[in-house]
Image (spheres, rainbow, N blue to C red):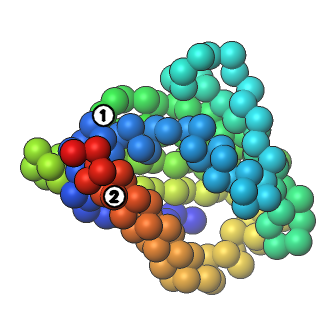
Amino acid sequence: MKLITKEDIEAPIDSVFNAVSDFPSFERSALRRGAEVSRVDTFEIPQVGSAWDIAFKFRGKERSLRATLAEFDAPNSLVADIVSKGIGGVTRVGLVPLSRSRTRLNVEIELTPKSLAAKLLLKSMSLAKGNMNKRLALRVADFAEGIEDQFRKAI
């Protein structure tokens, strides 16, 4: 299953990349939503190989996964590999400068089943794919708005 969205942001590419690579902020956000997040690596700053163990409830069951930074190409893109008991996946974040003060943010999440139970879970999720794509687009739009607000305050 693949979810894709894009958003144009009124901020330079460096500012947008700083926001999408602010991993401590994402950790705090996940903790506020009830997830358990722990950094696995020993790097001081996130880089290729940085990893996080994440535990959360989804559809009434405890789930856990490990997200590992597979690519970190500042300020153009980052890729995180996701591995859980039955599902693998990749999250790609790409940035394209549209002008000196405007950037396009592309987000792609691809999930693949590794077991029959995971295949059934993804199949049921794919039935709600339109709704999930809308929710992802709204989250990315809110995130983009936050980046724009931060950039305006910094000027």
68 to 27, vertically: above or below? above
Q: Is residue 66 left or right of residue 100?
A: right
Q: Splitting the image into 4 quarters, where does residue 127 fall? A: bottom right
State the residue at coordinates (41%, 44%). Answer: 19
**Label 1, label 2: how far apart the Cα atoms are:** 20 Å
Q: Is residue 26 left or right of residue 115?
A: left
67 to 85, vertically: above or below? above
The answer to whether residue 15 shows anywhere in this view is: yes
As drawn, the label of residue 53 is none
Q: Splitting the image into 4 quarters, where does residue 61 fall? A: bottom right
What's the residue type where badge 2 is placed? Asp
What's the residue type where badge 1 is placed? Pro
- Of residues 15 and 154, the one nearer the viewer is 154
- Of residues 134 and 26, the one nearer the viewer is 26
Q: Nearer the viewer, mark 1 or mark 2?
A: 2
- Of residues 103 and 85, the one nearer the viewer is 103
What quarter of the picture does the C terminus occupy? top left
Residue 88, horizontal then vertical, whole percent: 67, 48
SS class of the residue under badge 1? loop
Residue 95, horizontal then vertical, whole percent: 29, 46
Specify which label sits upstream in the sequence, 1 or 2.
Answer: 1
Q: Residue furthest right?
A: 61
State the residue at coordinates (46%, 73%). Answer: 138
69 to 7, vertically: above or below? above
Residue at which label 1 appears: 75
Q: Is residue 53 left or right of residue 103?
A: right
SS class of the residue under badge 2? helix
As drawn, the label of residue 149 is 2
The answer to whether residue 144 shows anywhere in this view is: no
Residue 149, horizontal then vertical, whole percent: 33, 58
What quarter of the picture does the N terminus occupy? bottom right
